[in-house]
Image (cartoon, rainbow, N blue to C red):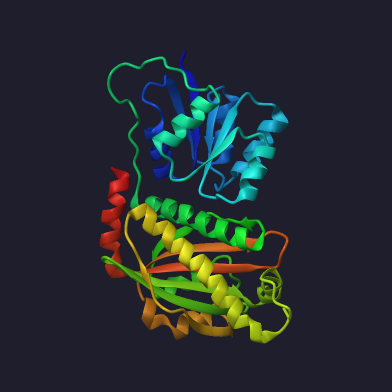
Amino acid sequence: MTIPILICDDSGLARKQMARTLPKEWDVDISYATNGAEGLEVIRAGKGEIVFLDLNMPVMDGYEVLEAIQKEDLPALVIVVSGDIQIKAHERVKALGALDFIQKPVSAESISNILEEYGILTLALKDAGDDTPMFEVDLRDACQEIANVAMGRAADLLATLLDVFVMLPIPNVNVLEVSELTMALKATEESSKVSALCQGFIGAGVAGEALLLFHDSSFEDMAKLMGHKNPKDANNEIEVLIDTGNVLIGAFLNGISEQLDMKFSQGHPVVLGRHCTVNELIHDNSEKWQRTLAMEINYQIENHNVQCDLLLLFTEDSIPTLNFKLGYLLD
């Protein structure tokens, strides 16, 4: 019997990878959705008996989908497939009725194991040949999915160290001129004051800078979470900024290097600005960035006044190498 499957993910690359990892002997009819609202319509139409669900999506995220499935008592077995690997994320999706959780990037082995564990896998053989649908996936989409997985690794490390839940956005990836860089920081209001940390990185054919913008209003709460005895002491701010940068930047770069099979060397962190606006920061350092491939992530800690923006700014000369590396994921 053919089983109706739904793959719900806003990334074309992720949908392609997920479809490719399903067991070839599994007799399934696959539907696709690019956000949670589309996914719910597919499930309501009876085309999502088994659902592979991303968490970070536009319109309606994975948590909202799980809540709706519970509320409407829809007949769907949901396996969450996400780059957000925080323990608290696992606990929340299980509490909302998800069958299990698989971290991105997915592998055929992990999919087969979980399907066999829950007795979902049927061994009805397909006709010879690979009928996995072809996808049109652009390089920007691929970069965004790479950033999504790396973002989750960094959030998990921060969450583990501080025993918190880190709220994750959809990463924003664009090739930008320096005049557009300020506009890319959508989560940062122009009126807010920030302190900034910069750390260079370099690999084979790839170089750039990681820029951490730490909102000044976040220092006190972050100092408390890090166990500082005097969290209101302004002298702790540099230490808080550097410690946060070490966690987020290092884990993010490691997440990218693992996916692209390349190693990065990191320079020493440099404090670029204290208590300045984003406009002032970009203006004062415009010669360094000019045209860049920017990956932007806004990290927020739930129930705490902590917010920071992480940008990975790749040099224009790095783009051909990144395209080449990403090409293997698109093939």
In the figure, 309 relative to 112: above or below?
below
Picture quarter containing residue 318?
bottom left
Q: Residue at x 69, y 68 (%)?
A: 225
Place of residue 22 in the rendered image (x, y in percent of width and height, measured from the top left):
41, 30
- Comparing 244 with 328, the one in front is 244
Instruction: Say whether residue 293 is left or right of residue 272.
Output: left
Picture quarter containing residue 188?
bottom right
Instruction: Say whether residue 30 is left or right of residue 315.
Output: right
Place of residue 143 in the rendered image (x, y in percent of width and height, measured from the top left):
39, 55
Counting the numbered discs, the total is: 0
Place of residue 274 in the rendered image (x, y in percent of width and height, measured from the top left):
57, 85
Q: Does any portion of residue 193 appear in the rendered image? A: yes
- Quadrant location, the C terminus: top left
Q: Residue at x 48, y 67 (%)?
A: 249
Q: Residue at x 57, y 77 (%)?
A: 241
Place of residue 126 in the rendered image (x, y in percent of width and height, measured from the top left):
35, 17
